[in-house]
Each structure stands twice: as C-alpha cells, then as structure tokens.
Image (tube, rainbow, N blue to C red):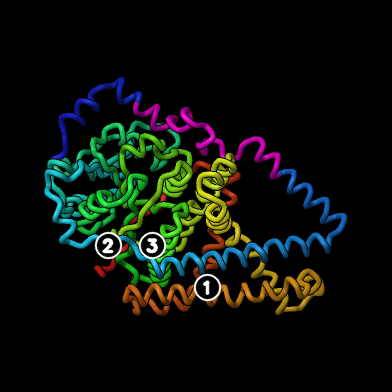
Amino acid sequence: MINRESEVTARLDDEDYCRFALERAVDGLRSDDPMASASVAILGWQKRALWTLLITTAVFLVWQPLPTLVTLVALCTAGYVFTMIDRVMIFRDGLASRPITISDEEALAIPDADLPTYTVLVPAYNEPEVVANLIGAMEALQYPAAKLQVLLLLEADDDVTIAAAKAIESSDAITTILVPPAHPRTKPKACNYGLFFATGEIITIYDAEDMPEPFQLRRVAAAFASLPDDVACVQAELAYHNGHQNMLTGWFTAEYGLWFGFLLPGLMRRNSPIPLGGTSNHLQRSAIDKIGSWDPYNVTEDADLGLRIAATGYRTAIIDSKTMEEANSDPINWVRQRSRWYKGYLQTWLVQMRRPRQLLGTIGLRNFIRFNLVLAGTPIIAVLNLAFWLITVMWFLGQPAIIGAVFPWYIYFPALCALILGNAATIYMNLIALCEDDRSDLLGPALTVPAFWLMMSIAAAKGLYQLIRRPSYWEKTFHGLDKTTEST
C-alpha cells in the first residue's frame, strides 16, 4: 500500500505547521465553541444547580425524613421503569431494522478510480505488544493502495511503542506520526493532531489491536454513496475474538453482540443520537470540518462526537461489517476501562445539557428523553444499583421497619416489576442476540450476567468519583492480555 508520503512529510517538516496543529488539537474545539468542550467538566451554573439540589434534599431529609426518602425512592423507581421500557423499545426497533448490509459484490462493484480517498488513524500509547499486529491488519484491507493512508499516532515520549513501531517503518503501509507531548494525554488529542496530516475524504479510527474485515472500507464507501447527504458517520460493528478466554470476556462479548447488533440499529431506525464506538467509526471529512473534531478533554470522545453529530442535524448509520477486538480479560483492567466510559457518558451529558433547548429543537422530544435515559441514566442507574442491592440484602437479613416504610404499595409494586421484569428482559435480549449471531457457546455468560452488573456498578461509582476529582484523566486500558488462539 502507498500513502501520500511526500505531502505528509512536507507538513511534518514544517515546525510552524506542527505547532499550529498541536495548538488546535488541544484547544481547537474549546476555542471555537467553549460550550461544546468538556475542558470544564461542570459549568458554574451547573455547580450551583447541583449544590442547590443537594442542600435542598438534605434540608428535607432533616425536616421530613420519611416523606423525603419515599419521594427519592419513587424517583429512582421511575427512572428504573422508564429506562427499562425505553431499552426494550430500542431492542424491538433493532429487531425490525438490522444494520445496513453491503454484499461483497456491491463492495467490489465500485471501480477503484471512483472510490474516495481514505485515511485510517491508529492512535496508540504504551502498547508495544500490539503494534506488531497492525501491519498485517492494515495490509489485509481490500482498498486501492493509492487511495489509502494509514497514520500511526504515537506520543513523542512513548519510547517503548516508538521502538516497536520502528520495525514496521520500512513498510509502505503505515506512516508513523509523533504527537508532541501536551496535556491532556488523551486519544482524541492524538486523533485531532493526526487530522492535520490526513488527506482522506473519509476518516476512520482503528485501535492498534483491531482486525477489521478486509472489505470494510469498500463497504463503507458504498454505503456513503447510497445514503443521504445528512449521514456524517457510518459505524461498523465491534466484536471480540477471545470470548472464551474467561467468564469476563464472555460477558463482554455477549454485551457487544446486543449493543452493536440490535440496540444501535434500533437507535438508527428512530434517528436517535448514537454514542459511537471507540473504533471503526467512519466519518465524512467534510462533516468533521463542520461539526468540529474530537474533544480532547472528554474521555469518551466517541460518544461525545456521536452526540454532536446528532445535535448539529447529522445522522449516523450502522453497517454490517465487523472489526474484531480483544475483550478485556482482567477484572481490574476492565473496571478501569468501564469507569472511564461511564465518566465520559456523564461528561457528554453535562456538555449537551448546557444548551438543552437547542438540543431539544434539533433532535425532538422523544430523542431528547432517550438521550437523557441513555447518557445520564446508564451510569446513574448503575450506581443506584449498589444502594438498592444493599437495601434488598438488609431486608432479607432483618426486615428493618424503615425499609418497609419507604416502599409503600404504589412504589413497591413498580419496583418489584422493574426488578423481576427488567432483569428477565435484559437476559432475554442477550439470549436473542446470541441466538441471532449463532453464539450458543456463550449461553453460560448470558445466564450469569447479573454478576457482570455488579462489576458495572463498581465501575460506575468509580467513574462518578473521578468525574468530580479528575474529570479529564484518561485511565489507560492495557491490551495484549489475550493468550488464547481463538479466532472466531
């Protein structure tokens, strides 16, 4: 494969251009639209509103403890019920609207001369163990070499990964770009810097350990050619190749099968905002220039960009093309990753709620409610699960009177329905997704998924704490832990 080396080299040799690129990578979005940046996690008026709510709640707890507790439990129960109903509705829509399918024949039917130019951004940090696999994955892509550019984005002081990358520098497939050290040390900052050296009409991101199916770029090009102009992004499906490594990877694989196979297509069918995956989101360069690139201060830059796509009137489509990844097999490493995701969801929600009227006017009432349930509801309910599980255990151990008092019948029965029907519905959706994907081998993880929810709650609590203490801190996820040879 050939990348347009001379053009990139000229830009890299221009110190003023590189300095400008770094400044824009760090502060571009914040300068152009401060309200869209998570550089300040919670604005002044948002802090005042939250403190007012906390103080008011504390005053009522002292003044009228029982009615206040009943009200809080009722609000939490309503949140559970609405979130459960919405998730089932999304799944139902996903059953009726699967991802866009582009056959091999359609992908190959486009003459090479008519294909758009493509840039693949591959950010990596402290990952020498997976860089060696990158060249094989990129060379497997079935796309004309003259129209494909692959940029490996490494931090300039990441000596171990740079050393590993030197082994592939002789390949025409990949150009290594060193990102000058600057805070925040995040993946979106590296991608923003890479954009200044990207020459493609379509931009996509792969992690260094990713294995996209060979025709993915051609399928996306064909999809863009047939979709309306307001589609700014085509998201490919993410799946895991090591689902059998342990129970955790099995849970993770089943979760991704449901999310990318059914829930995202369900959101697509209703034109709902779609939180993008961390990789394999294929973006029109022209749309990125209008929307703004990634927010380097948001630790789930993918979800944030997906929401900004919707907030500016563009749409995202889901395509039936898989990128294989490594599922996190270490519990501590998994909690680090998931807590970052939850923190980023809350960051994105706080940013978008700075201009709620504008968002409501763009996406409509139904999608506005769904946005709140998905982005804020997912991590908050995961945290609340810890409290309600503790209440349940206390009830079974001693049945304290206060627990019975805060669950009058008009709250108790909806809460019981949310507990029984919600858990059953989630397990059922997981089973349907596995059945549709012919993954009966993951039946065990699908049936034991409540243990996975406990880990999610721990991660959500950690993410909420970090949102307060270290909002833009990027907690690194380590890859290369899969020692299996599974390839399914």
Q: Splitting the image into 4 quarters, where does residue 155 fall?
A: top left
* Secondary structure of residue under mark 2: loop
> Which one is in front, 93 or 64?
93
x, y (%) of residue 355?
58, 40
Which residue is the site of mark 2? 101
> Which one is in front, 159 or 139?
139
- Write the residue at 31% across / 48% down: 282
Instruction: Tell me: residue 227, above or below residue 419.
Output: above
Characterize the local packing of mark 3: few (<14), some (14-19) or many (20 or more) Cα atoms within 10 angstroms: many
x, y (%) of residue 386?
62, 65
Magenta residues, start to end: 21-50
- Write the residue at 23% across / 52% down: 222
Characterize the local packing of mark 2: few (<14), some (14-19) or many (20 or more) Cα atoms within 10 angstroms: some
Mark 2 in CB contact with mark 1 (< 8 angstroms): no
x, y (%) of residue 226?
26, 52
Instruction: Tell me: residue 429, above or below residue 299.
Output: below
Tag 2: residue type? Thr
Q: Earlier in the sequence, mark 2 or mark 3?
A: 2
Magenta stretch: includes residue 45: yes
Q: Main secondary structure of the magenta part?
A: helix
Tag 3: residue type? Phe
Alpha carbon separation for disc pair 1 and 3: 20 Å
Left or right: 167 in relation to 209: left
Alpha carbon separation for disc pair 2 and 1: 33 Å
Tag 1: residue type? Pro
Left or right: 353 in relation to 409: left
Q: Is residue 379 visible?
A: no
Residue 450, numbered circle: 1
Q: Is residue 447 visible?
A: yes
Residue 260, numbered circle: 3
Q: Splitting the image into 4 quarters, where does residue 406 fall?
A: bottom right
